[in-house]
Amino acid sequence: MVGRGLLADLPGLLRERCAAHTYAVISDSRVAELYGPRVIEDLRAAGLRAELFPFPCGEWNKTRATWADLTDALLRARIGRDGAVVALGGGVTGDLAGFVAATYLRGLPYAQVPTSLLAMIDAAIGGKTGVDVPAGKNLVGAFHQSRFVLADIETLATLPKVHVAAGMAEAIKHGVVADAGYFEAILADAAAIRARDLAALERIVARGVAIKEAIVAADPLEAGRRQVLNFGHTIGHAVEACSGYAFAHGEAVAIGMVAEALLAESLGAAHPGLATAVRGALERFGLPVTVPSDLAADDLLAVMQGDKKVRARSVRFALPRRVGEMAQRDDGAWTVEADDERILQALAASR
C-alpha cells in the first residue's frame, strides 16, 4: 500500500491482516524517536498490545549481535508465538526485524512499515531478511514474507536529502533492469524528487513498487529472473564492506551500477553507451559514481568472491543489455560470469 497519511491505518491493517496478541515494534533509534511514540500510542488506542524495541541506527549495527540483543529483549518481554513483529524504519530495520521475525520462536508473522525511500521502493518488498557478517553483506538470513507493506509517503518529509538520493539509486536500478519508461520518468521528475515533493515521490514509489512486486511474485526465492534486481549489488556490496560502511547502501549501489555497466560493455553483453546513461541518471541526484581510490581492487575482488551469487567459485553479475532490458545467457540464466581480470579492469575504469 502506497499513499499519504497511511500510517493512521496501521492499527486496522494489523488487526485485519496480521492479528496477534502483542506487537513488537522494532525500529532503529532515529526512527524510534521520530515515529515510535506515535505508532505505539495509535496501536494502544485501538486496543492492541504493543511495545517498542529500538536498536542503534546504522548499517554497521545490522549484525548477529544486534539480532541476539533484539531476540533476547523479546524473550524478556515474554512475546509468545501469538505475537507479531512490526518493522518500522528503513532498509536496515526491515532486514533485521524481518530476520528476528523469521527466527524468533521458529517464526512470527510480521509487517513492513518502511520510512525511507530505499525501503519503500526496494528493501521492504520481497521477503529477504538478514544480517551482515565480517565476510560480507546479508550472508546470514532467510526468506520470510511480510503480511503487508505500508508505505506512508509523508514519512519521507523527515528523510535527509542524502537518503532521498540513496533511495533513487534503487529506483534507477529498477528502470535499468525492467522499464525504460520508468527510467525516463525518473529523469523527468528529478527536480521535484530532489525537492522532496510528495506527489512526485508517490509517483516514483508506486511505479517502482509495481516493478519489483511483479518480478518477486514470479520468482520469490530468487531462482531465476529475480536475480536481475542484483544489478550493481555485487560490486556495491564490496564497496560497502571494504569502506567500513562509510557509504549508504544506495550510494554504494550507484557506484556498483556504473562499474557493472562498464563490465557489461567490456564483455559485449551491453550496447555501447549503457554506462554513460546510467552514470548520467545517478549524477542527476548527486550520487557517487566512481570507485574510491583508497579501496584496493584486490580487497574488493576478495569480497565479491564471497558473495551469495558466486557459483562454482565464479563471480556472476546481473548485467543490463540496455536500459530496460537485461542480458540473458543462452541457457536462460540471468547472470553472467566474469573472470578476475575483467572485473579488475572494470574497477580500474571506474576510478
Image (cartoon, rainbow, N blue to C red):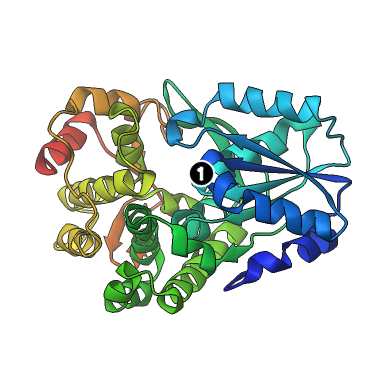
Q: Residue at x 57, y 57 (%)?
A: 216
Give the image quarter of residue 6.
bottom right
Depth check, front residue: 119 or 305 = 119
Q: Residue at x 77, y 64 (%)?
A: 13
Left or right, 288 with reference to 115: left
Left or right, 190 with reference to 7: left
Depth check, front residue: 7 or 177 = 7
Q: Is residue 294 above or below residue 289?
A: above
Give coordinates of residue 213: x percent, y percent: 57, 63
Residue annotated with mark 1: 30
Left or right, 39 with reference to 300: right
Q: Residue at x 20, y 23 (%)?
A: 298
> Which quadrant does the C terminus fall into?
top left
Give coordinates of residue 108: x percent, y percent: 78, 40
- Circle 1: element type: helix
Left or right, 264 with reference to 147: left
Give coordinates of residue 220: x percent, y percent: 61, 52
Residue 71 visible in this rendered orientation of the protein: yes
* Mark 1 Cα-neighbour bin, 10 Å: few <14, some 14–19, many ≥20: some
Residue 142 visible in this rendered orientation of the protein: no
Give the amino acid at mark 1. Answer: Arg
Give coordinates of residue 81: x percent, y percent: 87, 36
- Marks counted in the figure total 1
> Which quadrant does the N terminus fall into?
bottom right
Q: Is residue 55 above or below residue 284?
A: above
Q: Residue at x 72, y 23 (%)?
A: 72
